[in-house]
Image: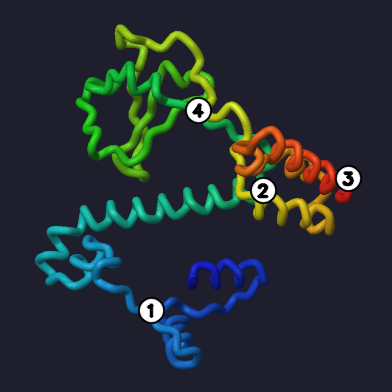
Amino acid sequence: MHRLYLKSMQQENKQQVATQRQYREILNSEFNIGFFKPKKDQCEICTAYKQGSETIKHKMKQKYDSHINNKEAVRSLKDLDKDFAMNDKTDIDFYSFADIVKSQNWVKDEEGDKMKISKVKEVSFCKTSVHQKMNFRYDFSSSPRSINLKKSSRTITEDLPKLHQQLLPIESKKLKGLLELCHNNDIPEIYHNFYFSLKSKKSIGATNFEAEENTTDSDENSSDCE
């Protein structure tokens, strides 16, 4: 909440903002909103470092700093994903990586170091060479390492298939609501064709008679929106 507050203040070009402590005290005293976090939800590393003695803090210093760097890196990646989801209008392809698993040659990376699969935090592929090289990282603040998938005797020679061959169906009520939003022009007209192309779960699993009824309903909704 404090991060959202800071972002809002930056957008309004306000110079004086409340610190995290001030923000917490204001909400506690004036709005009766607490920020107590149960032990089960607390970070073990952060809690141990903050509550530990100077000796413990000295021993944990490197681990704690690495942990904080990872948290900040993950947070920035999440913010990037949010901006991408809201602003990017391109289509996103999802691929099936079953063939990658079949030809797994994950013993050593290109530097000759043994891969510790249980410690991997991120796996990524280049879209143009997805069946040739796999990149991975043990933490989000370090540079990625690479594994050459071509070294395996079971090298993938064909492009990976798409995970879904068509748009996934959604709930009938949700589809009806989206079409009503199109009808009321609450959704910009540039996106109408996409929403008209959506299918509901009911129409996918319906009998021929039900499918015809759904098609008729969709046509009526489409003509109303137009």
**Mark identifier at residue 223:** 3
Counting residues from the start of the chain, the first of labels 1 and 2 encountered is 1
- Tell me which amino acid carries mark 3: Ser
- Mark 4 is surrounded, within 10 Å at the Cα level, by few (under 14), some (14 to 19) or many (20 or more) other residues, namely some
Counting residues from the start of the chain, the first of labels 1 and 4 encountered is 1
Identity of the residue furthest to the front in this view: 209
Q: Position of residue 148 (x, y in %)?
A: 35, 17
- Front residue of 183/126: it is 183
- Dot 3: element: helix
- Mark 1 is surrounded, within 10 Å at the Cα level, by few (under 14), some (14 to 19) or many (20 or more) other residues, namely few
Which residue is tagged 2?
A: 87
Q: Position of residue 158 (x, y in %)?
A: 48, 11
Which residue is tagged 1?
A: 35
Which residue is tagged 4?
A: 95
Q: CA distance from mark 1 to mark 4?
A: 41 Å
- Tell me which amino acid carries mark 2: Asn
Q: Is residue 27 above or below residue 112?
A: below
- Dot 4: element: loop
- Front residue of 139/204: it is 204
